[in-house]
Image (cartoon, helix red, strand yellow):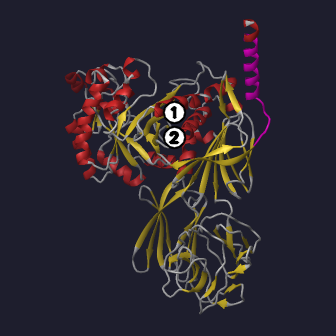
Amino acid sequence: MKKGTNLLIVLIIQLCLLSNHSSAQINTTLLKSEISHGIPEYGFNVESDTKPSWDDPAFSEAITKLAPKMLRFPGGTLSQYFDWKTGLVITQKERDEKNLRDYREYTLENRPNMELNSLLSLKSAVDRLNFTPIFCLNVISRSLENQLEMLREARSLGLPIDYIELGNEVYESKGDFERKYPTAKDYTDTMKIWVTTLRREFPSAKFGVIGVVDKKDDRSRTWNDVMVAELTNTVDAITLHLYQGTGVGNSYELGEIPVALSNPFRKMISLTKRISELPSNWNVWITEYNLFDLNGPVAETWSHGLYTGLMKLLYFESSKVTVLLNHQVKGNPSFRSLRGRDQRLTAEGAAEQLINQAMLGQKTATKIDFSDNPDIYSGTFSYQALTGWTFEGADQNTAVLINASVNDVVVDATNITSSFYADQKFMPKELMIQPKEGNEISVLKTQGRDQLTLKPYSITVIYYYPKDEFYVVNPTSNLRIRTNSRGALKMKDDSFTGTNQHWTRLSTGINTFQLKNIGRARIIKAISEQEVTTTDLTDTSEKTIWKSIQTNNNSLFLENTFTSKRIHSSCNSGTEDLRLKDSTYTDRCVQWIFKPVETNRNSYTIKINDNPKTSYSYYPNPFENELKIEDISLLQEILLISLTGDIIIDSKVEINQKELLWNTSHLSPGVYFVKTLNKNGVSKTYKVLKK
């Protein structure tokens, strides 16, 4: 009986392994789940001893590509041996004086080439790269008074003091840590004093106490319990570090890919358990996460990129996770996102870049469910092939989809959008086990209306507008103003919609415009001098929100009287005609903005605006090969400036010039600034992103 049972188990495992290697196509439909919440502060742990200078242009550009919202100062374990006054690690002499015996690599004599990491250089980086610092306090080799002085100095420089981490991995059974804090209770007693003192100076700051995920010895086994018992009402969060191995040996074979990729799902089980043990008022700061494969065969392969991509998306599942930092930007090959003097992306960095840029400017994350999501087996452990989230809040929504299987996956996206374009990074299976740099990862750009094919072992970002759009259409130029409404609308191009969504920017030309409600056959009309109202344009029971669109003079406006807002239209000269459905003409062309106005429910109006707004518009943002700037007749000069302050493009505006088109194909991806100077000498600056 026992022998037969063993044979059956072996047969089941073999069948599971065969299913992992099936090349059959998977067909599935995207479905939004009920799991939806804000997006964590995401970014990197930046080890002070391995990063280049913040003033290094290549490093600044590379950090920009990785698009972090938060960076950790001054790093991980190094932070406990860091002297903020020098911007370097402590000396051997000080170590001897304080009886510090561990982590001797963090000694100035052993780090002669360490780049200065001062508060002044951090301030310069924050200003240029636009990230939030999280301060990891030195609770081992520095006093409360010293660290309070550091935070005061940071505040005086204009650095935000929003997140404070109370040490780093002091639960470890290391000599220095145990001598300083023999028990978890010794640590909590000290931190009560620290937090009480620091809160008086920084009342709006959030504090995170050090916690543990893997309880591997007596010290760590009870550590979290003591944190909860002693500090529940003292701190705001617990900080956790999540690392997981590969499950493979010293070599990496094709058949072991499912084994390696199962580990983010295994670690998620551990994290879920730890979160369930925490007080309801605590958030979770994951200030380090990555594959743990020191000098192993998986690090720096595309498997590594998929691994950390899965970790990031899986950790989104808990709304308590409010900080999510990858370890690390630069340094050990087992972890790094950047390599070389020219700061090239690793395979892992390429995955981080793709996902981070998809979240740029977004506010809300919603988990994606799949109508068919096959299991992948690693032994008897199984995990799902597909993982995905949508991100919303910016002008354009995004979705990140990871296909961790060997199969092509055909995705029906019609539940979330009616059109999209996508960036996909992947590697053929036979190359998955080889170390690769980021620029060696295969890239596929596609666009479509309903279906998308996910390559095996791929990370895909979909860029899309919400489903059920309708348009104000110019049939001559085919340009549209996009919006949504709860009522079904039929426009000139016969497109249909439902649901409540938004207007977004789009310039138009001349001739006919029509907005029609198919249910009540009502049409917007306008004349040049008098107000015309149609009362049943849409059947809306919720607010229809109009997005801000900029314009120049001689405005008309389209009014949503339910929300007391208007969409304006204008032109720069009186030589073009706008013709609406009732055959009434005006001597104005169109471009739309909004302006508040008091009106009655369910009424829309087009009429003359006596006090037009003056501004300009630029799009797309993010941009790739071109950046277009319109309504520039009131400007005299427009500049494109790099993060380092260099002027990339300087354009003088000619008389009667209406628009400007820049060729940006030669620019590196990253953040740039559009600076304008109007004819009154007033300048404005706007941030744009090159994909």
C-alpha span from label 1 to label 2: 8 Å
Secondary element under disc 2, as helix, strand or loop, is loop
Question: What amino acid does circle 1 point to?
Answer: Thr
**How many numbered marks, from 0 up?**
2
**Residue pointed to by mark 1:** 272
Q: Residue 665: within the magenta? A: no
Residue 360 spot, x, y in % from top left: 52, 53
Q: Quadrant of the C terminus?
A: bottom right
Secondary element under disc 1, as helix, strand or loop, is helix
Label 1 with label 2: CB-CB less than 8 Å: yes
Residue 169 spot, x, y in % from top left: 37, 28
Nearer-N-terminus badge (1/2): 1
Left or right, 233 with reference to 636: left
Residue 27 spot, x, y in % from top left: 77, 42
Closer to the camera, 488 or 57?
Answer: 488
Closer to the camera, 209 or 473?
Answer: 209
Q: Which residues are magenta?
A: 6-27
Residue at x 72%, y 7% (from the top left corner)? 2
Which mark, residue 75? Answer: none
**Residue pointed to by mark 2:** 318
